[in-house]
Image: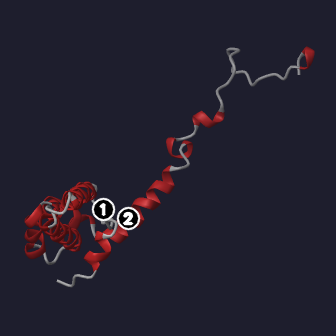
Amino acid sequence: MKGGGIMEENMNPIGQPEKNQETNQPPEMQNPTEPEMKKDSESNEENSGSNGDIQENKAIAILSYIGILCLVPLLAKKDSPFAQFHAKQGLVLFIVEIIGMFLMPLFGLGVLINLAALIFSVIGIINVAGGKMSKLPIVGDLAEKFNL
């Protein structure tokens, strides 16, 4: 300690305070949340099938959420768990859209149903683009009951 009770900082040879040791650590040591993110992505991959299947079938899986085109991946990619998962959810949404069309005359009930189906379709397309097999609320549970 120097006079006046002030603690002396670590000085480098040219008389400047040394940098904190934490900043000299490698980048992976500075961000403690990075390993947690890796664990989440690894568990996602385990639930969603192989990366090759996902990358190969992303484009066709997007068709699952565009009306009657949900039948394309459902029939053409029977060997792809990724495409089948999204095709089944898309089929449920397509059926809901048809029901919504029949309910149009009932004071806008059909409009609300079709709007909900559109929102779920957009969420589904975002999931496909991200390579995720996330169940859509309500729709995902109904889709699991299909054994096609």
As helix, strand or loop, the secondary structure at mark 2 comes to helix
Report which quarter residue 122 is drawn in. Answer: bottom left
Residue 26 versus residue 73 in the image, above or below: above
Q: Nearer the viewer, residue 46 or 123?
A: 123
Image side of residue 103 versus residue 72, left or right:
right
Residue at image position (67%, 24%) is 18
User: Residue 49: percent from the left, percent from the top?
Assistant: 29, 71
Q: In which quadrant will I find the N terminus?
A: top right
The structure's colour scheme is secondary structure
Quadrant that contains the C terminus? bottom left
Count residues near mark 1 (Cα–Cα under 10 Å), then give few for <14, some for 14-19, many for 20+: many
Distance between the Cα atoms at labels 2 and 1? 7 Å
Farthest bottom residue? 147
| Residue matched to label 2 | 44
Q: Which residue is mark 1?
A: 132
The picture places residue 38, in percent across and down from the top left corner, at 44, 57
Q: Residue at x 14, y 62 (%)?
A: 105
Query: Measured along the vertical axis of the image, is residue 142 above or below residue 135?
Result: below
In the rendered structure, the answer to whether residue 145 lies left or right of residue 32 reads left
In the rendered view, does 130 fall on the left or right side of 27? left
Query: Could you tell me which secondary element the residue under label 1 belongs to?
Result: loop
Give amino acid for label 2.
Asn
